[in-house]
Image: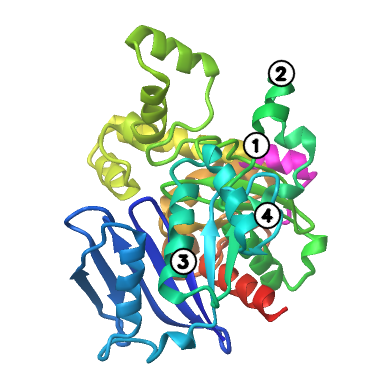
């Protein structure tokens, strides 16, 4: 079985073709700047080199045509006929409280994803476009599966997901914590249990997905009991351009003083805050790190705030879990910034964490492994996330049934 994994954004479309016989990746690439004159598709060839081609992609249907052409390319293609694609798996950001597992896509599921669009206005509409475009290009007979970012978090108890606002807003508008990056947290927590050689049902794990967008999740016996992101991906700790959670009066105070609309405040908190807003340098942590090394004090402050906030959430989840067997770092920063892991773990020494700094500094660029000394009370591990594989596996399981 060959599964095509799709992650459709508002102006982008990432894909991977995976042979589920041995879970090998046959092809991967991405369409960028969909809807503009500068749209292009980039993909890797069999020898690992990358090719970029300009293509007309005024919408997602044309983007799928570009993906099809790349897959069937006489020189670089991974397949000879579209019939080789058995099924298609889609990453869907917001499944609300309706979806606690992956599902086969039909008209009812598509309608529900559309109804949930107000909770993820930048993502769910793009996913719908991707699904419809996929149907146009591959036909209705190829089954499609929806894998939701929010599904893994649906085991949270009410005390964790409810907000202390009038209950009617939960009933009328669905205002509550949903959490995100669920597919990543699910993958690395299961992988951590495998590495430790224990059933996940016996473990308390804190998973840290740290990238341009970041979240931390408390997993007790394989089930989420709390996570940092909330109603939207803005919640939690500071990120590349997002503020993270803050005193709500900060929002109203700035809006009143600056005369900002709700949309302008949303733009400020989502796109101009976080590492970018504090450092004034960049949303890319590599740039902020370089600036700090050059003596930029605001860059240092941004890092000090980030490490402190991550450690705070880990500490609170340690309490919520009633202890912790393992902490996992994953995603772009979590996998490639040793200074971030060290900065966070320095705060966790009070919990018995003993980081092996030499190993930590050497564990980057695809390397994985244990980062703590043998006598550390909590094991800290770096695990590269693989959300696409989770989507492919779910798709295979559902289609096979």
- The verdict on residue 336 being magenta is no
**Measured from the top left, where is residue 143 in percent x and y?**
58, 74
Would you name the residue on which mark 3 appears? 6
First-in-chain label (1 vs 4)? 4
Against 81, residue 265 (above or below) is: above
**For the residues bearing labels 1 and 2, Cβ distance under 8 angstroms:** no
User: Spatial distance from mark 3 to mark 4, Cα to Cα?
Assistant: 19 Å
Badge 2 density bin: few <14, some 14–19, many ≥20, Cα 10 Å: few
Picture disc at residue 166:
2
Q: Which SS class for mark 3? A: strand
First-in-chain label (1 vs 3)? 3
* Main SS class of the magenta portion in the image: helix
Picture disc at residue 152:
4
Give the quadrant of residue 322.
Answer: top right
**Measured from the top left, where is residue 150 in percent x and y?**
62, 50
Q: Nearer the viewer, residue 61 or 313?
A: 61
User: Spatial distance from mark 1 to mark 2, Cα to Cα?
Assistant: 15 Å
**Measured from the top left, where is residue 276 in percent x and y?**
32, 35
Picture disc at residue 177:
1
**For the residues bearing labels 3 and 4, Cβ distance under 8 angstroms:** no
- The verdict on residue 325 being magenta is yes
């Amino acid at each position: 079985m060959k599964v095509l994994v799709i992650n459709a954004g508002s102006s982008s479309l990432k894909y991977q073709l995976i042979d589920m016989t041995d879970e090998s990746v046959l092809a991967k690439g991405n369409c960028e700047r969909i809807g503009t004159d500068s749209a292009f598709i980039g993909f890797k060839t069999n020898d690992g080199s990358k090719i970029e081609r300009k293509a007309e992609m005024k919408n997602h249907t044309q983007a799928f045509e570009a993906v099809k052409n790349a897959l069937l390319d006489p020189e670089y293609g991974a397949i000879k006929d579209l019939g080789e694609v058995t099924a298609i798996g889609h990453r869907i950001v917001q499944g609300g409280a309706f979806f606690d597992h992956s599902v086969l896509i039909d008209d009812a599921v598509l309608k529900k994803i559309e109804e949930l669009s107000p909770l993820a206005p930048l993502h769910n509409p793009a996913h719908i476009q991707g699904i419809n475009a996929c149907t146009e290009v591959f036909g209705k007979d190829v089954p499609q599966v929806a894998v939701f970012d929010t599904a893994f978090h649906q085991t949270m108890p009410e005390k964790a997901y409810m907000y202390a606002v009038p209950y009617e807003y939960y009933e009328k508008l669905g205002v509550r914590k949903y959490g995100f990056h669920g597919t990543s947290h699910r993958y690395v927590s299961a992988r951590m249990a495998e590495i430790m050689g224990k059933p996940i049902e016996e473990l308390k794990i804190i998973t840290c997905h740290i990238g341009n967008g970041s979240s931390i999740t408390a997993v007790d016996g394989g089930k989420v009991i709390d996570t940092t992101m909330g109603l939207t991906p803005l919640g939690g700790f500071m990120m590349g351009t997002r503020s993270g959670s803050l005193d709500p009066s900060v929002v109203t105070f700035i809006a009143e003083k600056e005369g900002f609309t709700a949309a302008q405040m949303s733009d400020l908190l989502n796109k101009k805050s976080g590492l970018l807003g504090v450092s004034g340098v960049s949303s890319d942590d590599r740039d902020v790190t370089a600036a700090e090394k050059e003596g930029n004090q605001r860059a240092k402050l941004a890092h000090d705030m980030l490490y402190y906030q991550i450690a705070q959430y880990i500490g609170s989840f340690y309490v919520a879990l009633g202890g912790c067997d393992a902490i996992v770092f994953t995603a772009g920063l979590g996998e490639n910034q040793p200074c971030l892991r060290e900065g966070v773990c320095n705060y966790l020494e009070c919990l018995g964490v003993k980081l092996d700094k030499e190993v930590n500094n050497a564990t980057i660029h695809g390397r994985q492994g244990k980062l703590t000394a043998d006598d550390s009370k909590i094991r800290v591990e770096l695990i590269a996330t693989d959300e696409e594989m989770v989507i492919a596996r779910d798709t295979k399981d559902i289609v096979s049934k």
